[in-house]
Amino acid sequence: MKRIYVNEKWCLGCHLCEYNCAFANSGEEDMVKALKGKPLFPRIHIEEDDKISFAVSCRHCEDPICVRSCISGALIKKDGAVRIDREKCVGCLTCVLVCPYGAVTAGEDGAALKCELCLNNTRGEPACVQGCPNNAIVFEERQGEA
């Protein structure tokens, strides 16, 4: 299965992946209308320290602890991707607490929010990959990974 991978050596820390993600998941046709003057709720986040920047997003684990921990059954693994049924999410955010990668956050409405590989909103690559100016984020299948 294809997944998102990040090469921190190439990450500029520009946050364009976050903007592209938030826009792609906004349901709007115009980026300015979707994002200007509004809080962003991207499903990928840039972490930075003194020497490196890197994007954090869901790794769609083989045996995801977030799915096993979800009390409402809102998190499921379908076709290799961990997905959220936002109608079922009760906002307990147990998934946020148990994710070892920090890839699940609370959304604007209090429900869990995480990368779903843009399966519902783009053609081809996820928006963060398309919007990365330095190709630090890639969407590919790697040998030896399930």
Image (cartoon, grey):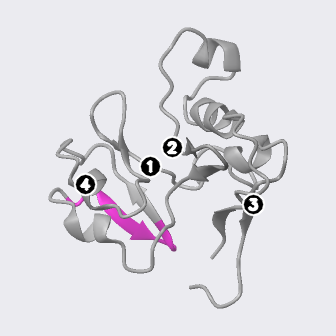
Which numbered disc covers residue 73?
A: none
Query: Callout 1: 10 Å neighbours few (<14), some, many (20+)?
Result: many
Disc 1 designates what residue? Answer: 114
Q: At label 4, which amino acid type do we have?
A: Leu
Of callouts 1 and 4, which one flags the residue occurring earlier in the amino acid sequence?
A: 4
User: Whole-Å distance between the Cαs marked 1 and 4?
Assistant: 13 Å
Disc 4 designates what residue? Answer: 97
Counting from the top left corner in percent of width and height, residue 123 is at 74, 50
Front-lying residue, 50 or 73: 50
Q: Nearer the viewer, mark 1 or mark 4?
A: 4
User: Whole-Å distance between the Cαs marked 3 and 2?
Assistant: 15 Å
Which numbered disc covers residue 43?
A: 2
Counting from the top left corner in percent of width and height, residue 119 is at 59, 54
Residue found at x 55% / y 29% = 26
Magenta-colored span? 73-81
Which numbered disc covers residue 138?
A: 3
Q: At label 3, which amino acid type do we have?
A: Val
